Amino acid sequence: MCPQLYHSYLTKTYITDSHYIKSTFTNESEWLTCMYNFYYSIDGERYGRFNTRNKFPYGYVLPKHKDPTRTRPIVSMKYHPLKNIYKIIGRCLQFLLKSLDTNIVPHYVLFKTFDLKIRLNQYLTSLQSTFPPNTNIDFLCVTSDIKNMFTSLRHESIINAILWLIHTSIETHHRSSQYIVLDEYDQQIIHFYPTYSEYNNLIMIDITTLIPLIVEFDLSHIHFSIGTMIYLQQICGAPMGGLLSQWYAIIVCVYNEYNFHISLTDSFRIFNVRYMDDLLSIIARIY
């Protein structure tokens, strides 16, 4: 890409955009000290190693394939010093989401595309059991994209949605669901406490304290560089490339989907699934 054109994209995406302000940090050393102090304030060694191969996150842009005149703002967090702890928290958020009973807490998340066929069959079976065999049913099918799924999320909305997820999880399970235990290395080993697993390297997470603390710190410390001299802070939205950003976006959607679904009077006639930002809606019209 032409350097002058790329520079204009960077300026339009970051410098003149109201989602970003000048960072309070003037160099990488100040930022690293802040990360280090937070790590030890939460006794971070209990949850994950401090990433010593650390670098200040950096931002760049990628042109969109459908429209090269528009760009995606990407922030690389590959060498973030709290990377290991953020990944642990991301696993906990994923576990909490998957543990939701959709009969009690309806939402539209499709974790695997293979599940679409299963959920669609369940929807059609439910309609057949609700209405007589000779009932005339037409279907309206709509597909859509969720725009600005990362960049336009208000931080307050993210925090509220995560607190709702934690509260809902505790309410719908049992008291001990306040704690999650997981294996540091084996991605498959994660449970609500208590667990009688004899595996080593188990980490215990108090979801009512540690998760909100980490999330609030992460959202208030989204700092990155553009080039070598410009340091910015993102004050609205979550960066594409952020270690927790995908979970922020999904959980906010789940929270809004739940509130929307329970407001419907004939929710059994509506089928909705969402795979990241792609939404499929089917509405049964009864005659």
Image: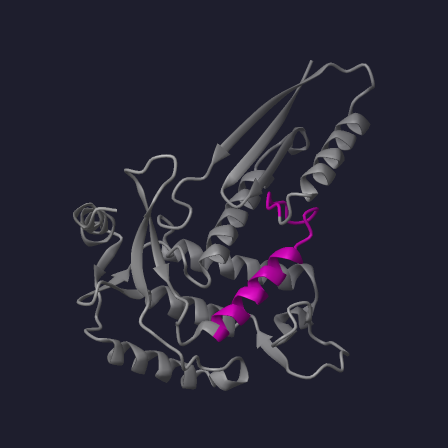
In this rendering, the answer to whether 221 lies above or below 62 is below
Q: Is residue 156 above or below residue 121?
A: below
Q: In the figure, 267 relative to 248: above or below?
A: above
Whole-percent x and y of residue 217?
38, 70
The reply, left or right, for residue 41 in relation to residue 201 is left
Task: Tell me which colouring the rendered structure shows.
Answer: one colour
Quadrant of the rendering where the C terminus is positioned: top right
Q: Where residue 64 sits: x, y (%)? A: 36, 41
**Picture coordinates of residue 111, whole percent (x, y):** 62, 49
- Displayed quadrant of residue 158: bottom left
**On screen, residue 49 above or below 97:** below
The answer to whether residue 32 is magenta is no
The image quadrant of residue 201 is bottom right
On screen, residue 90 versus residue 39, left or right, reads: right
Count the marks.
0
Image point 30% across, 40% down: which residue? Answer: 70
Q: Nearer the viewer, residue 64 or 224?
A: 64
Pick whichever, 45 or 83, lies toward us.
83
Q: Is residue 101 left or right of residue 71?
A: right
Q: Is residue 96 magenta?
A: yes
Residue furthest to the front in view is 2
Residue beneath the point at 40% across and 76% down? 81
Quadrant in the picture for residue 29: bottom left
Tell me where the magenta segment starts and ends, as one range: 84-110
Give x and y (percent) for residue 157.
Answer: 41, 54
Picture residue at 47% right of the left edge, 52% below the top: 249
